[in-house]
Amino acid sequence: MNYCNPVRNGDGELSYWDRAGVQQYYGVRVLPGARESFQRMRINGDAMDDLLARRADGTFDVWLSNGTALVYSGAFSTGYTDAWGWNEGNRFLVADITGDGMSDLLARNAFGGFDTWVSNGTTFTYAGTTSTALTDANGWNEGHRFFVMDIDGAISPTTGRRSKELVTRDGGGAFEVWRSNGSVLVFANAFSTLLNNARGWDEGHRFIVMDVNGDHRDDLAVRRSDGDLSFWRSNGTSFNEDTTRIETPFRTGAGWKFGHRYFPMDLNGDGYDDLLARDPSGSFTVWRSGGWSVSSYSVFTTPFTDASGWNEGNRFY
Ligand SMILES: [Ca+2]
Ligand SMILES: [Ca+2]
Ligand SMILES: [Ca+2]
Ligand SMILES: [Ca+2]
């Protein structure tokens, strides 16, 4: 690739020039570990999901569902413009910070500040900023860094609802839990794991958030490159790895690293999240949870084959 790199340093790392050359040749590069940015939102707290759309100039348009269509319902201005780098990377998260059933918006700037924008049902209002060390310079704009999940499963005494926390993973495998105080995020606790970047945990499908044992605390299903799954179970404040590993065909070399493959959902409604896995031929295998682990239970076929384009893009909801 050095034909496009005017400064050859020979250290084996791709330089900016290399990347620009690759991008020019093959199209836009895929950010390591980047997920689809679409996150579902309930702006006005009814049971119908709504849509928030950011324009390049930082204006957000609110589109509320009336049950049959999305209806434009107003706009609000922010400084989150494309020109200032808000169009790519780990910038926006959706979480109900206030715990009132209406989704709020978190915006992480390059310097680690999380702005909270609270939904009042029709528009969003800036509510404050939480300073963190989760900066772009420290690598937080790419990879598997942020998980909005209910780690404690606690019911709020004020709202009577369960709300999600922000769980973060740094390159060294240390996790932090950030909890809402009702208006902004506040650091709660930290714990370390071996799920670090050096061992490849920042890339491809690695983590699946699902409540495997039905205690309302979201657990992490962790996929190893050899296809083994292990559950890192939430105890309310941190994750403990189950010693049992589950053998699956989900090997990195067999096409299970990228694409629309994993669908955590409670298929049989027993409160334990199951894992549905879609293979390239469109077959779904149901890995049913028995509370402690998942095991292959049944298979059904669909027309959703990779060959027909079902492995990329905005396909499944
Ligand atoms: Ca809210
Ligand atoms: Ca919670
Ligand atoms: Ca759980
Ligand atoms: Ca189930």
Image (cartoon, helix red, strand yellow):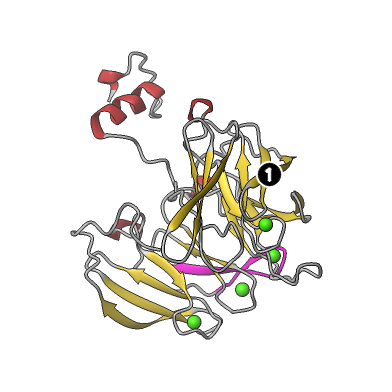
Res 70 quadrant in image: bottom left
The residue closer to the viewer here, 188 or 179, is 179
- Residue type at mark 1 is Thr
What kind of element bears circle 1? strand
Q: Which image quarter holds the C terminus?
A: bottom left
- Between residues 156 and 276, which one lies in front from this camera angle? 156
Mark 1 neighbour density, 10 Å: few (under 14) some (14–19) many (20 or more): some
Q: Is residue 225 left or right of residue 213?
A: left
For residue 288, above or below residue 264:
below
- Tell me what residue is drawn at x 40 percent, y 65 percent: 262
Q: Residue furthest left?
A: 307
Q: What residue occupies the far top of the structure in this picture? A: 6
Q: Which residue is mark 1?
A: 125
Q: Quadrant of the rendered structure where residue 267 is?
A: bottom left
Where does the image place residue 154, in percent across and percent down from the top left? 73, 70
On the picture, is 118 further left or further right than 11? Answer: right
Q: Which residues are magenta?
A: 228-243
User: Taking 220 as reference, is 35 left or right?
Assistant: left
Magenta stretch contains residue 157 = no
Is residue 232 one of those drawn in magenta?
yes
Residue at 32% across, 52% down: 313
**Foreground of the two, 248 or 300:** 300
Classify 234 as above or below 200.
below
- Is residue 119 depicted above or below 151 in this figure? above
